[in-house]
Amino acid sequence: MFTVACGGSGSSSGGSTGTTPPSNNVLAISVNAGPNGGYANGAFASVTVCVPSTTTCQTIDDVLVDTGSSGLRLLSSVLTAALPQQKASDGNAVVECLPFVSGYTWGPVQTADIELSGEKASSVPIQVISGSDFPVPTACANFGSPQETLSALGANGILGVGTMAQDCGQGCESASPIYWECPASGCVEAGESLALQVQNPVALFSTDNNGVIIELPAVSGPELTLSGSLIFGIGTQSNNALNGATVYTVDDDGNFITTYNNQSYNQSFIDSGSNGFYFLDSSATGIPVCSDANYFYCPSSTQNLTATNAGSTGTPSGAVSFSVANADNLFNNYSSDNVFEQLAGPNSLSGFDWGLPFFYGRNVFTAIQGHNTPGGTGPYWAY
Amino acid sequence: MSFFFVNALSVNAAKSGRWAVILYLAMLTISLPAFAGLGEDVSSVQADQAHMQGSLRTTQTQAYTLHEIQAPSGIVVREFVSPTGKVFGVAWQGPWPPDMRQILAGYFGQYQQATQAQVNSRAGRRPLVIDQPGLVVQSGGHMRSFSGRAYIPEMLPQGVSAEAIR
């Protein structure tokens, strides 16, 4: 992590024929131990943020690539660039409390120019995760536990490149415990217009802005690291065509349908930010959980399973084969590895959470809501 | 399983009776127990309803009473009450999670401790599963679509399986 001046990067096209060359739309990603060490199935990338309309920039490594959320979130402890505070129309600071499954991230909404490979989005609202800039309101703390440190987050930040253009959307245009305005007298719940909410930066690129592809190679057992690409745009350049991938539409809530053992679960989703296959529970699957970490499955022998994914309207559909290994054995026998394609665990009863192992050996397209692509208008997933 | 409809009380804070409703809710908040939800008395359901500014629908089954609170935000909380009048399970669904301190009541501290105890790199980011003596929590989803449930295994009425809590 370092601070640099971003001018003079050699991208001048003086003397060319006048056609705009395609942007470099490939950002390197790596599944590795992460900045905290030992992360299982986390895909990390470097993100450059700049003070808007300046060349004062900072590149932050080890940011988790997450197709299950939308918007960039950075730990304030790693951010040195002085980004401007997002203000509401009345001049008050906008601060966010974003809930995740087991806790929340709290901190101010600030704006940054974001550079990812050769793509750039200007004045993007992001969240700076900080428990100290503004006191955490009770209604935020009541979501659970704060994820405001490196050890709690396991990453320097989260790059949310999911199916939605904003993190919350219309539900936060009226007051909610998600968005807050914080005058000196204290923070109060406030509705925020879509434009003031934390944005999926990809949707704000000038080109290649209709979605992303994550490309990671197949693996045949636990690995130390895995290198791949986050590619911007769908069908906008020679390197991001759908190439016959099946398009699975996603509903307004960001879900599609997974069927397993003749039961359909319509709150299922694909999420590079989840670190395993998470589905049902022991009583529904017959697979025991680990005795020491009962949030992972520990079958006595590896289970080869099949489920069927379908678009949110019920079609199209296609079978998915996946395997569930004993998580204790994986971690004990491959203690220095970080890539585990057979790591799985129970979920809430709502359905399937197809985490990062789903992406190994499969190019997964995530199309953003309201954006046109050769495969139709987002939101959808395709693979 | 046969359900029959018993009672419907709808509080709608959107239209003409807004101020009367707000006053009513304020009075409810003052007069009912501050701690509501899991493990608490059935009377706490109304405190949860007031807290969520929601509508309440009650359904009676042979083994338990289901109180379903629907908030204007789209959050739905279902509270399962035993024949002895205790909330033995809660389930939720919505664009963001409900006020977990409100619905887990006296179990919120145990929930927080268990959540923090699971923070390690191997465990990564994933759905939350807590399975301890005296408390089971399963919570999953993502922004715009969260769902989960919590229950006290020892308090499940006879003949009620955990699968019913959803």
Image: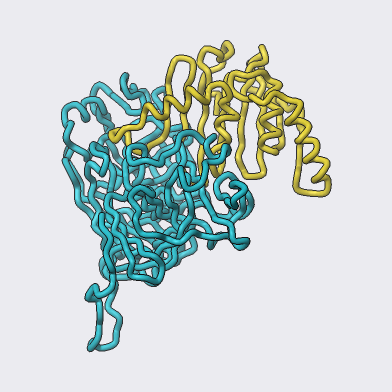
Chain identity for the colour cyan used in the image: A
The residue that appears at 61% across and 33% down in the rendered structure is B77
Q: Where is residue A119 in the image (x, y as percent from the top left)?
A: 33, 67
In this rendering, does residue B141 appear at all? Answer: no
In the rendered view, would you say A168 is above or below A11?
above
- Most foreground residue, A212 or A187: A187
Q: Position of residue A122 (x, y in %)?
A: 41, 68
In this rendering, does residue A58 appear at all? Answer: yes
Give left or right: position of B48 versus B105: right
Give left or right: position of B150 versus A301: right
- Most foreground residue, A175 or A30: A175
In the rendered view, would you say A377 is above or below A353?
below
- Most foreground residue, A6 or A72: A6
The residue that appears at 56% across and 40% down in the rendered structure is A137
Could you say which quadrant of the image residue A287 lies in?
A: top left
The residue that appears at 44% across and 56% down in the rendered structure is A126
The residue that appears at 25% across and 21% down in the rendered structure is A300
Q: Where is residue A170 in the image (x, y as percent from the top left)?
A: 58, 55
- Position of the N terminus of chain B by quadrant: top right
Give left or right: position of A312 versus A294: right
Q: Where is residue B110 in the image (x, y as percent from the top left)?
A: 48, 22
Chain identity for the colour yellow used in the image: B
